[in-house]
Image (cartoon, rainbow, N blue to C red):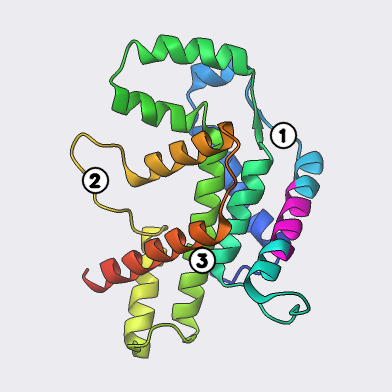
Amino acid sequence: MQQHIKQKKTFQSMWYEIIKPLLKYTFDSMDVEFRKMTGAQIRDEEDLKPYVEKEFKTLRHQLKIECYGEGKKELHLDSRKLGAILCASLLNVKCIEFDETKAVSLSETVKNKISQKEFNKWSVDNTLVNYKIAYLASLDLVYISLIYCLLNNNDMLVEELNETQRKGYAYKLIKQGRLCNYPLWQNFNSFAVNMIISLARADVFNREFDMQLYSLQLWQLEMYTLKSVSLQ
């Protein structure tokens, strides 16, 4: 994650400092055999970026109306809602393309060789990579905004933090490079893996993505992160 933290409000900044680096990271994290067998590739930026931007702006307008009603353009959505919009936009636009028939065939082979827990993680990194991108992008946006608020003394908690505490938390998070993960439960998938699989299932079964509900989940992760760094 970038060491020089700014608040991400425009789609342009989100694209170049969150989405584009994340596309490279997730693609590089894919199994080499999967990439070769399925012909996986990141979609051309000139084609992809305008499509994602259009989705983002359409969904942002939609959520503003849901939250504030018509004629409230001057009101801004917080980072969790923007994170939910970004997630929804990327769910609607698959950023990494691959041969799905070959992907299913390889998945069956892999599934017979490893445990279910290992297979779920493998799936998230490969066949479900586009859902992974959507999820991680939303977390990155909230993470960056949280650091920005801490470093700039923005209004946050009712129980206020002093400047030393704020900066201390911010520097811990910058060093960590992400929001804090929930604790692992023995023999269960991580929260992130479960979330990504849930996003994929909802998409496959054409369930509507609830941006307001998802924004609350991002808020929970943000609050858990603040609590965690305060105890370090």
Q: Secondary structure at mark 2?
A: loop
Report the amino acid beneath label 1: Arg
Residue 109: x %, y % from top left: 42, 9
Quadrant for the C terminus in the image: bottom left
Name the mark on residue 83: none
**From this viewpoint, is residue 154 visible?**
yes
Q: SS at mark 3?
A: helix
Q: Which residues are magenta?
A: 52-61
C-alpha gap between disc 1 and disc 2? 34 Å
Q: Secondary structure at mark 1?
A: loop
Q: Are marks 1 and 2 in contact (CB under 8 Å)?
A: no
The residue that mark 3 highlights is 144
126 and 120: which is toward the camera: 120
Of circles 2 and 3, which is in front?
Answer: 2
In the shown orientation, is residue 208 left or right of residue 11?
Answer: left
Q: Residue at x 33, y 53 (%)?
A: 181
* 1 or 2: tag closer to the N-terminus: 1
Identify the residue shown where x is 49% and y is 59%: 213
Query: Can you say whether 87 is above or below 34 in the image?
Result: below
Query: Disc 2 or 3, which lies upstream in sequence?
Result: 3
Q: Residues within 10 Å of mark 1 (few under 14, many from 20)?
A: some
Task: Please name the residue that numbered disc 1 is placed on.
Answer: 43
Distance Cα–Cα, label 3 vs label 1: 25 Å
**Magenta-colored segment: predominant secondary structure:** helix
What is the three-letter code of the residue carrying label 3? Answer: Ile
Task: Indicate left or right for 23 with 30 as reference.
Answer: right
Q: Choose top left, top right, bottom left or bottom right for residue 79.
A: bottom right
Q: Which residue is mark 2?
A: 184
